[in-house]
Image (cartoon, rainbow, N blue to C red):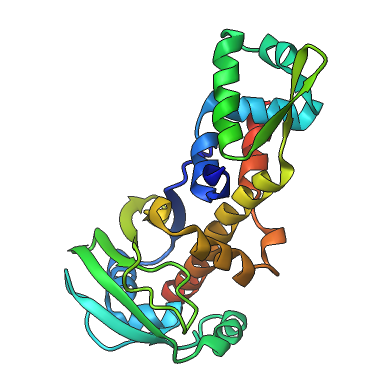
């Protein structure tokens, strides 16, 4: 899927409270069935699945059938990539502004 | 709370210096170049395309050393707005560090510096936006260029996850 190669898509997929909570749940509790995952949310299983599909499109999570259930899990690498991009830009600015501070305060 | 937008990031820093001093450090091309690590060929005026080269900063010797391999690398920024003592913005190509690549046809990001009064000095806000339009290939280069340092950096998503769980 083309979308899964786009870091921007990953960030967009994470730019939502519900999706971040889903990522949080999956990262703490490991692979979860849709029934378990949806349990803590005040919305329908269909609505949760919709969010998961958006993240699947960004390569952040994937699902596998287990018996009659669907199990969702995190794609750790995509999450790591997304994290790195923000970290890099953010840290570069920290460093650059540190120099400006030293420059104007002396 | 950290907002995980793709397109924009924002930084704030308190500077214990007079507003006029900070303003000069931002908008005087020579001064900007001194702390940033560039030598510009022109003045910063709204709409101006200012070329320059990377020239290692002396403000932080360690950073200067890291910039050294890129010394002389051409660079270009386009000044956007200058609202005296308050707002300065320009556009550039982020991570334009490969001499063999012509970045001129690619999208730019917008960098905006805003000065606000704070009890102990001036609160400087810096934002950079427009990342969504930067080709993924460039972002991958950014990963590679920063490979050594990134492990130590702020873990934005992890922090966020910790704050909501």
How many numbered discs, if any? Answer: 0
- At which x and y percent is residue B118? 37, 50
- At which x and y percent is residue A70? 73, 18
- At which x and y percent is residue B100? 47, 83
- The residue positioned 49% from the left and 79% from the top of the image is B98
Name the residue furthest right.
Answer: A67
- The residue positioned 47% from the left and 84% from the top of the image is B99
The part of the image, by quadrant, that contains residue B32 is: bottom left
Left or right side of B127 for B28:
left
- A24 or A70: nearer the viewer: A70
Does B143 sit above or below residue A78?
below
The answer to whether any part of residue B38 appears in the image is yes
- B72 or A32: nearer the viewer: A32
- The residue positioned 75% from the left and 13% from the top of the image is A36
Does B154 sit above or below residue B81?
above
Q: Quadrant of the N terminus of chain A?
A: top right
Does A62 sit above or below residue B95?
above
Left or right side of B104 for B153:
right
- B143 or A91: nearer the viewer: B143
Left or right side of B129 for B57:
right
- At which x and y percent is residue A69? 76, 14
- A1 or B63: nearer the viewer: A1
The answer to whether any part of residue B124 appears in the image is no
């Amino acid at each position: 899927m083309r979308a899964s190669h786009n870091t921007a898509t990953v960030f967009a997929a994470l730019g939502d409270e519900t999706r971040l909570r889903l990522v949080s749940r999956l990262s703490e509790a490991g692979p979860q069935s849709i029934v378990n995952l949806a349990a803590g949310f005040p919305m329908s299983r269909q609505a949760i699945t919709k969010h998961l599909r958006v993240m699947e499109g960004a390569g952040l999570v994937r699902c596998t059938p287990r018996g009659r259930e669907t199990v969702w899990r995190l794609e750790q690498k995509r999450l790591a990539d997304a994290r790195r991009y923000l970290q890099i830009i953010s840290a570069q600015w920290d460093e650059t502004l540190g120099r400006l501070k030293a420059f104007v305060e002396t | 709370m950290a907002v995980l937008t793709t397109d924009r990031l924002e930084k704030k820093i308190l500077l214990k210096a007079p507003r006029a001093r900070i303003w000069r450090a931002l908008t005087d091309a020579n001064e900007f170049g001194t702390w940033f690590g560039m030598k510009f060929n022109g003045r910063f005026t709204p709409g101006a395309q200012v070329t320059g080269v990377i020239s290692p900063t002396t403000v932080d010797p360690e950073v200067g050393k890291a910039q050294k391999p890129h010394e002389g690398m051409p660079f270009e920024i386009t000044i956007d707005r200058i609202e005296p003592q308050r707002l300065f913005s320009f556009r550039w190509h982020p991570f334009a560090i490969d001499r063999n690549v012509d970045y001129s046809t690619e999208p730019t990001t917008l960098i905006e510096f805003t000065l606000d009064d704070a009890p102990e000095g001036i609160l400087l806000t810096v934002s950079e936006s427009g990342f969504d339009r930067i080709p993924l290939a460039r972002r991958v280069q950014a990963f590679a260029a920063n490979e050594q340092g990134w492990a130590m950096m702020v873990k934005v998503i992890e922090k966020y996850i910790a704050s909501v769980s």
